[in-house]
Amino acid sequence: MKFFIDTANLDQIREAQALGVLDGVTTNPSLMAKEGITGKNNILKHYVDICHIVDGGDVSAEVIATDFEGMVREGEELAELHEQIVVKVPMIRDGVKALNYFSDKGIRTNCTLVFSPGQALLAAKAGASYVSPFIGRLDDISTDGLNLISEIREIYDNYGFGTEILAASIRHTMHVIECAKIGADVMTGPLSAIEGLLKHPLTDIGLEKFLSDYRKGNG
Ligand code: G3P
């Protein structure tokens, strides 16, 4: 399972990278705005900065246009920025056309804002490299987000689609574990969800006992 971090915050990306388990980064316009990154040149530079932190990892950069020509124009510009860039395209009619176009051109894509198995099937048919089902946002409206991951896994396995399932809108550590059990190829979430995997009270208690026993015998 690949671990991506879902943020545009460079410090958090550096921290996750330093842990040695980071495979990539996903961003979106809301995450860029949260970091105060505005203006086209600043945004493009920020993507390159992220690529330099994540050694060889994929970095999703989202198009803003919602029409086919605009998405193609923006996507080609993003892909030119750095070889690690994956063009993030929304699951809308022109987005499906753009996924197909980018696939033919050998430009890697991440189809975002996916909330149903049908949308995921369409993204795979259009040649998306990644599909991003938003599990947390489904949970928010009392729908089973993890079940969507299972449904997509089944459909993709039935037909051998190469599109990777990127479980997005991960909110906490249990989401990560459940996605791993289901067989999501990738998860993207906050640093806290990754760091939560580290923690167990018995680890802390056990380590404290080992160290205190050592201190007893070694002054
Ligand atoms: O980047 C897409 C997705 O992970 C957004 O998550 O927490 O805003 O629902 P969230």
Image (tube, grey):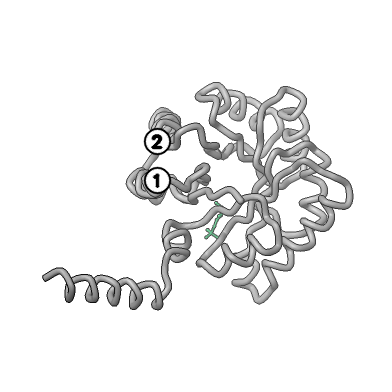
Q: Look at label 1 and name its amino acid.
A: Ile
Residue behind mark 2: 53
Q: Is residue 66 left or right of residue 155?
A: left
| Residue drawn at x 55%, y 39% as measured from the top left | 60
In the image, residue 121 lies at what x, y percent?
A: 82, 49
Instruction: Find out whether the residues at labels 2 and 1 contact each other: C-beta distance under 8 Å.
Output: yes
Q: Residue furthest right?
A: 159
Label 2 Cα neighbours within 10 Å, binned few <14 / some 14-19 / many ≥20: some
In the image, residue 3 lies at what x, y percent?
A: 54, 50
Q: Is residue 100 left or right of residue 12?
A: right
Q: Look at label 2 and name its amino acid.
A: Ile
Q: CA distance from mark 2 to mark 1?
A: 7 Å
In the image, residue 172 lies at what x, y percent?
A: 50, 67
Picture quadrant where residue 40 is located: top left
| Residue drawn at x 39%, y 72% as measured from the top left | 203
State the mark number for residue 13. Answer: 1
